[in-house]
Image (cartoon, rainbow, N blue to C red):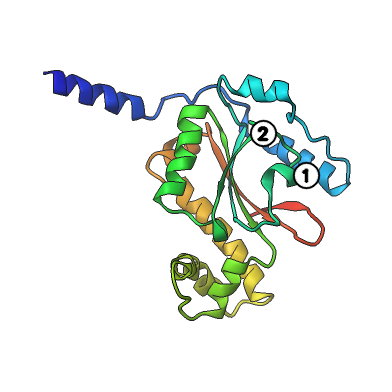
Amino acid sequence: MLKALLLTAVAASFSFAAEPAAGPDPDVALKVLLTGNRRFVAGRATHPHQTLARLRELSKGQHPSAVILSCADSRVAPELLFDQGLGDVFIVRVAGNILDDENLGSIEYAVEHLGTRLIVVLGHQRCGAVSAAVQGGKPAGHVGKLVEDIQPSVEATKGKPGDAVENAMRANVLRMVSLIADDETLGPVIKEGKVKVVGARYDLDNGRVELVK
């Protein structure tokens, strides 16, 4: 009996809430990010929420307005390019901004437990991981797994006009968006409009972020 009660309690603690914890409207959160990016590009970044007072405030808990699945590239720093600060964005970073169980679990956690209602998949210009997938072959070590995960996007865009790496990068972003939308946990709240997932591209040359559709 005790074992059954404990199992029930554990299951309840990980169940997806019917209503995510209160967070900003996803369209509002997206506007905040894009407005911050415009400040960054214009050289007028305000560097918000970077004080010791903010640090102490966040010690009591966090409620980021967006979760961003971003490439691990050192030139792509979401907090900087969106002009955000401590506690504003929940970042999941991996080369090629690809999804695995751990990354998906991190996104689910941000939505379910932190109340985040906007998910952004952020690819970028001249992505090295995508370039490796376009070049083909079988890289040594764990890099090979990254290339394997991006390969479907390379195949989907093969032969299309334009730059092969750019085409594959955009397709990879949209593929990750689709996988998130089809997730058994996130899918229902996305379909109901409680949570929004969008794709975006960061330009290494000028710092601009644009939505990918």
Q: Residues within 10 Å of mark 1 (few under 14, many from 20)?
A: many
Query: Is residue 182 in sight in this rendering?
Result: no
**Which residue is painted at 57% across and 63% down in the image?**
171
Question: According to the image, label 1 marks what residue?
Answer: 37
User: Image quadrant for the C terminus?
Assistant: bottom right
Mark 2: few/some/many CA within 10 Å (<14, 14-19, 20+): many
Residue 155 x, y percent position in the rendering: 50, 74
Instruction: Give the Cα separation between the discs numbered 2 and 1.
Output: 13 Å
**Residue type for callout 1:** Asn
Q: The residue tagged with tag 1: helix, strand or loop?
A: helix
Give the secondary structure at mark 2: helix
Q: Is residue 52 visible?
A: yes
Q: Report whether 112 appears left or right of 53.
A: left
Q: Which amino acid, mark 2? A: Ala
Q: Position of residue 9 (x, y in %)?
A: 27, 21
In the image, farthest residue toward the right: 43
Viewport quadrant of the N terminus: top left
* Residue 174 sits in quarter: bottom right
Above or below 51: residue 71 = below
Question: For this rendering, which residue is in front, 26 or 69?
Answer: 69
- Which residue is the site of mark 2? 29
Nearer to us of marks 2 and 1 is: 1
Percent coordinates x, y for residue 160 in the rendering: 61, 76
Q: Quadrant of residue 118?
A: top right
Pick the front one: 130 or 195:
130
**Residue 80 higher or lower than 98, as above or below:** above
Q: Give the left or right position of residue 87, taking residue 16 as reference.
A: right
Residue at the left extreme of this rendering: 1
Q: In this view, does 167 lie to the left or right of 1?
A: right
Q: Earlier in the sequence, mark 2 or mark 1?
A: 2
Q: Where is residue 181 in the image (x, y as percent from the top left)?
A: 47, 46
Please name the residue shown 53% across and 27% down the image: 115
